[in-house]
Image: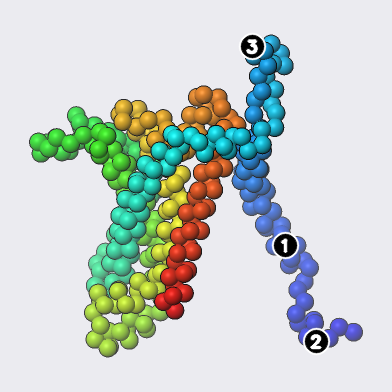
Amino acid sequence: MTSPRRARGARPRGRDAAAYLFLTPALVLFALFTAVPIGYTAYLSLRRTKVTGLGLGRGSRTEVFAGLANYADAVRDGALWAGFGRVLGYGALVLAVMLGLALVFALTLDSAQVRLARFSRIAIFLPYAVPGVVATLLWGFLYLPSLTPLRGLNIDLALLGPRLVTFSMANIAVWGGTGFNMLVLYTALRAVPRTYYEAARIDGAGELQIALRIKIPILTPAIILTTVFSLIATVQVFTEPTALRPLTNTISSTWSPLMKVYRDAFVTGDLYGAAATSVLIAGVSLALSFGFLRVVRDRAFREG
């Protein structure tokens, strides 16, 4: 005879079957479009084309196991690390400005004195809804010397020149990404009980003190989350430099690491080297993300 405790703790098998049934489409899509491509990329990164003779006859080009040779070539490639250097400078600028603005907007919209909060949220979030290629082309044409608004002010700035092209690309990323990060932070703020703020106001705290001493500490997990996501997206930047490249000669085909992967795979035909570089970029993204989380965790541990 089944005990009452076991009967209460047991779950119907039909409920578990229904849960797996609903999860099946997501699992299938994840396997087809994420897990399988990752596995195939890792497989290609360990292969190499062997050319015999002049490479003209049938069977003169064969695929052979290369071990870590492709990774060694990628690590020794100066163009790849130069791209990482440019992207890190670009990312430092984007993350500081974008997340700073997102935090300011979220705190402002959550303030008790704000007006037209719903319209402001939509207006700030709207640029994120614009596809990245479209946004980059729109800004790119505004950056052209013949169309830039600065021309009417008699200000001669080469916005796509060697000195300012990184700032111009960062502006596009900030314009498009601030709204999304603002919405994440604002949603986290709306989940905070209003009684916290009411108690602070009774104690005489102003809106600035509430923001600095209550809201920002509560937002710390959301800020860490948006920083990690933004860091990964920055290391993998591709749309902005690729879309702006036809408009200027200052952006090379290897400006960012992913641009180099595209060139190697689809221009020079080195598919195996491109696969190894892709895996290396993923490793760098993971290292930076986990490194940031480790620093945050250690700092929180010391302060706690």
User: How far separated are the C-alphas under marks 3 and 1?
Assistant: 60 Å
Residue 160 — which label? none
The answer to which image quadrant residue 156 occupies is top left
| CB contact under 8 Å: marks 3 and 1 | no
Residue 176 picture location, percent across and down: 35, 48
Q: Residue at left 37%, top 65%?
A: 186
Q: Residue at left 80%, top 86%?
A: 4
- Which one is closest to the eye, mark 3 or mark 1? 3
| CB contact under 8 Å: marks 3 and 2 | no
Q: Residue at left 28%, top 41%?
A: 168
User: How far separated are the C-alphas under marks 3 and 2?
Assistant: 80 Å
- Which one is closest to the eye, mark 3 or mark 2? 3
Q: Disc 2 marks which residue?
A: 4
Q: Is residue 22 above or below residue 245?
A: below
Earlier along the polypeptide chain: callout 3 or callout 2?
2
The answer to which image quadrant residue 62 occupies is top right
Q: What is the three-letter code of the residue carrying label 1?
A: Ala
Secondary structure under the numbered disc 2 in the rendered image: helix
Residue 185 picture location, percent across and down: 39, 64
Q: What is the three-letter code of the residue carrying label 3?
A: Leu
206 vs 251, left or right, is left
User: Counting other residues with Cα less than 10 Å from the Cα at mark 3, is it few (<14), some (14-19), or many (20 or more)?
Assistant: few
Residue 209 picture location, percent across and down: 26, 77
Q: Disc 1 marks which residue?
A: 18
User: How far separated are the C-alphas under marks 2 and 1?
Assistant: 25 Å
Q: Disc 3 marks which residue?
A: 54
Q: How is the image coloured?
A: rainbow
Q: Nearer the viewer, residue 129 or 200?
A: 200
107 vs 73, left or right, is left
Earlier along the polypeptide chain: callout 2 or callout 1?
2
Badge count: 3
